[in-house]
Image (tube, rainbow, N blue to C red):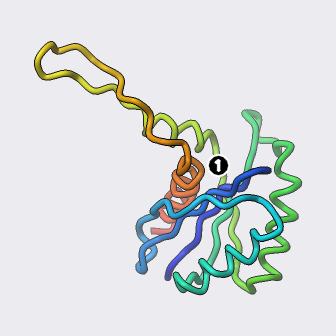
Amino acid sequence: MRYLGIDYGSKRIGVAVSDEAGEFALPFSVLKNDSSLLSEINKIIDVKKIEAIVLGESKDYKGADNVIMISIRIFKKIIEMETGLPVFLELEFLTSAAADRMNDRPKQSRRSGLRMRQPKISNVMLDASAAAIILQSYLNRKL
């Protein structure tokens, strides 16, 4: 079973897909949150033969809904009606920060032994990486 993972944001939507067995999540793309969003998601669903969607559930440190959660719940209803697929919520907690940390690992120089920072990988796929973290969390719980 192939899954689609979504990291919902007010400006950008990170998208990840699972492998065909539904074991591993891979960053896929970042979409603009605009009028073409549902059309773009439907294209991905058709091409990748997606059977279920995992959507990040945004909570604060106390476990209460973040402000964006209102928009996420509305989006969840719309995407369920639009696609006919089941949509599961998966708690996301600092997934964008985790994805950013993965892109900013210090490297050690072999010659000097000094730790040197490499330039960050472009943030273009940061939201897709966050979506992959959300999706992988869901897949790990299912296995």
Vertical position of residue 23 compared to residue 107: above or below:
below
In the image, what residue occupies the spot 72% across and 58% down?
32
Where does the image place residue 131, in percent across and percent down from the top left?
A: 58, 56
In which quadrant of the rendered view does residue 73 lie? bottom right
Where does the image place residue 133, in percent across and percent down from the top left?
A: 52, 53
Q: Is residue 32 left or right of residue 14?
A: right
Q: Is residue 131 left or right of residue 107?
A: right
Secondary element under disc 1, as helix, strand or loop, is strand
Vertical position of residue 73 compared to residue 86: above or below:
above
Q: Is residue 139 left or right of residue 52?
A: left
Residues packed near mark 1 inside 10 Å, few (<14), some (14 to 19) or many (20 plus): many
Q: Could you tell me the amino acid type at mark 1? A: Glu
Residue denoted by label 1: 92
Quadrant where the C terminus sits is bottom left
Where does the image place residue 42, in percent across and percent down from the top left?
A: 68, 80
In the image, what residue occupies the spot 64% across and 72% down?
53
Closer-to-camera residue (92/98) = 98
Vertical position of residue 10 compared to residue 80: above or below:
above
In which quadrant of the rendered view does residue 104 lie? top left
